[in-house]
C-alpha cells in the first residue's frame, strides 16, 4: 500500500484502479439530500497538491462515523482508487484520523514540494541580502523577519497558478531569478529596486490568499474583498518604511538617490505590476523596472499554468491537452531538446544506405 498525494493518485488512475492510501484534510463536510429522499455526506478533501469531492452514501459502513467528523479534521483514506461517475473516488475504503506528526507532514506537502519551497525561501533570503541599497535591504529584511511565517503559507492565487500553500514563495523565488537574469541583459535597470519589487509586488496577498495556520482553508477576508492585494501591498510597504524611518531616517538623508524617490519607485512597481487598468493596476508601468517586473510576473504565471496542465489535464489527442483557463487555447506538449546522434555528423561523408544504423537511429 503506497502513500500518495491526490495529484499522484489522479495521474496514476487515468488507466486503471490503484490501491493506495492518501492523507488529507476535510475542508468542508456537508449532509445533503438524495433524489429519493435519503441523505449522503459530501466531503471536500484537500492536501498540498490538489482537492477532491467525495460522496459518502448513507448505506456505506463508514457513514455514521464519518458524519460525526468535523471540518478541519485530518484523515487517512485507504482503498482502491479510480475515476468514477463523480470523479476520483475510492472503493472498499476505510479511514482513520491522523496523529500530530502525520498532520504536520500533510501540511508540509509531498517531500519534493516541501524541499523545493525550502530551497526557494533560502534563495529569496540570499537574493534580498545581496541588495546594496541600505534602505531596500533593510525593508526586505524587516518584511521577512516580521511576516516570513505568514509569507510561507500564502498562495500566489486562489486559482490558476501556484494556488497552493507556500505557492507565493515559489512564485517570488522564480520571479527573482528571472528578474536578475534580465537585469544582466538590461544593465541600465536598477537591480536592487527590481529584486525588492518582486518581493513586495504581491505582499498584499498575505491578507488575501493566506492559508490558515493549521490547514488548507484560504478564508476570505473583508480587507481582501474591499481593498485587494495591490492597495494592501502599498499600505504595508508604507507602514514598514515609516517604521524604518523612525530608527534609521537620519542616516538615509545623504544617500542618493533620495529616499523619497526610492519609496515612490518601489510603490510604482506594486501598483503597476498587473500591467493594464482592466487587470486591476491603478497605474500603467512607466519605468524599465516596472515593465520588467510585469512581464516576469506574467511569464512565471503562464508557464506554471502550462506545467500544471501537462501534469493534470486530459489528453484530447496525442500531445494536445484540454484547455485550462485562462490559457488562450489547448496546451501542446513542448518540443524536446535536440539529442545528437551517437556518431558525430560528417558533412563530407556519403549518405548512409538503407537499413544502416545511422538511418535507424535517426528514425527512432
Image (cartoon, rainbow, N blue to C red):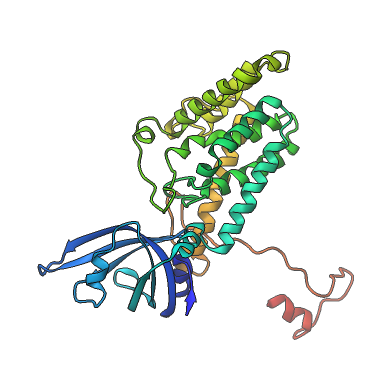
Q: Quadrant of the C terminus?
A: bottom right
Q: Is residue 240 visible?
A: yes
Quarter of the image for residue 95 reads bottom left
214, 84: nearer the viewer: 214
At which x and y percent is residue 357?
78, 83
356, 307: nearer the viewer: 307
169, 322: nearer the viewer: 169
148 shown above or below 263: below
Point 20% across, 67% down: residue: 40
Please identify the residue farthest to the left as the structure is shown.
37
Q: Is residue 297 left or right of residue 343?
A: left
Q: Is residue 245 left or right of residue 92?
A: right
Point 18% across, 61% down: residue: 32
Q: Is residue 67 left or right of residue 322?
A: left
Q: Is residue 14 visible?
A: no
At which x and y percent is residue 260?
62, 16
175 shown above or below 68: above
Point 59% across, 53% down: residue: 117
Amino acid at each position: 500500500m503506497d502513500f500518495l498525494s491526490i495529484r499522484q493518485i489522479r495521474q496514476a488512475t487515468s488507466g486503471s484502479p490503484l490501491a493506495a492510501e492518501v492523507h488529507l484534510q476535510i475542508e468542508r463536510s456537508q449532509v445533503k439530500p438524495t433524489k429519493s429522499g435519503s441523505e449522503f455526506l459530501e466531503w471536500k478533501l484537500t492536501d498540498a497538491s490538489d482537492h477532491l469531492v467525495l460522496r459518502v452514501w448513507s448505506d456505506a459502513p463508514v457513514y455514521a462515523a464519518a458524519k460525526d467528523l468535523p471540518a478541519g479534521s485530518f484523515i487517512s483514506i485507504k482503498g482502491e482508487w479510480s475515476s468514477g461517475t463523480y470523479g476520483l473516488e475510492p472503493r472498499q475504503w476505510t479511514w482513520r484520523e491522523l496523529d500530530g506528526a502525520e498532520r504536520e507532514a500533510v501540511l508540509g506537502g509531498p517531500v519534493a514540494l516541501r524541499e523545493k519551497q525550502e530551497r526557494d525561501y533560502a534563495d529569496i533570503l540570499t537574493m534580498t541580502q545581496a541588495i546594496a541599497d541600505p534602505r531596500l535591504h533593510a525593508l526586505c529584511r524587516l518584511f521577512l523577519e516580521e511576516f516570513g511565517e505568514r509569507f510561507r503559507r500564502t498562495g500566489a492565487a486562489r486559482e490558476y497558478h501556484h494556488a497552493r500553500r507556500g505557492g507565493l514563495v515559489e512564485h517570488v523565488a522564480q520571479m527573482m531569478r528571472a528578474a536578475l537574469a534580465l537585469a544582466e541583459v538590461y544593465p541600465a535597470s536598477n537591480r536592487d529596486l527590481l529584486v525588492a519589487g518582486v518581493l513586495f509586488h504581491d505582499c498584499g496577498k498575505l491578507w488575501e490568499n493566506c492559508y490558515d495556520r493549521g490547514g488548507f482553508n484560504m478564508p476570505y477576508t473583508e480587507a481582501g474583498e474591499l481593498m485587494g492585494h495591490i492597495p494592501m501591498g502599498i499600505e504595508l510597504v508604507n507602514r514598514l518604511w515609516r517604521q524604518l524611518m523612525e530608527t534609521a531616517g537620519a542616516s538615509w538623508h545623504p544617500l542618493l538617490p533620495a529616499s523619497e524617490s526610492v519609496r515612490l519607485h518601489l510603490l510604482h512597481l506594486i501598483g503597476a505590476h498587473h500591467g493594464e487598468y482592466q487587470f486591476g493596476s491603478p497605474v500603467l508601468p512607466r519605468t524599465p523596472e516596472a515593465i520588467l517586473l510585469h512581464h516576469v510576473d506574467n511569464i512565471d504565471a503562464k508557464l506554471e499554468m502550462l506545467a500544471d496542465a501537462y501534469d493534470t489535464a486530459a489528453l484530447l489527442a496525442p500531445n494536445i491537452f484540454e484547455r485550462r483557463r485562462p490559457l488562450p487555447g489547448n496546451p501542446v506538449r513542448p518540443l524536446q531538446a535536440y539529442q545528437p546522434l551517437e556518431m558525430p555528423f560528417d558533412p563530407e561523408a556519403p549518405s548512409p544506405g538503407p537499413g544502416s544504423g545511422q538511418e535507424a537511429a535517426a528514425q527512432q
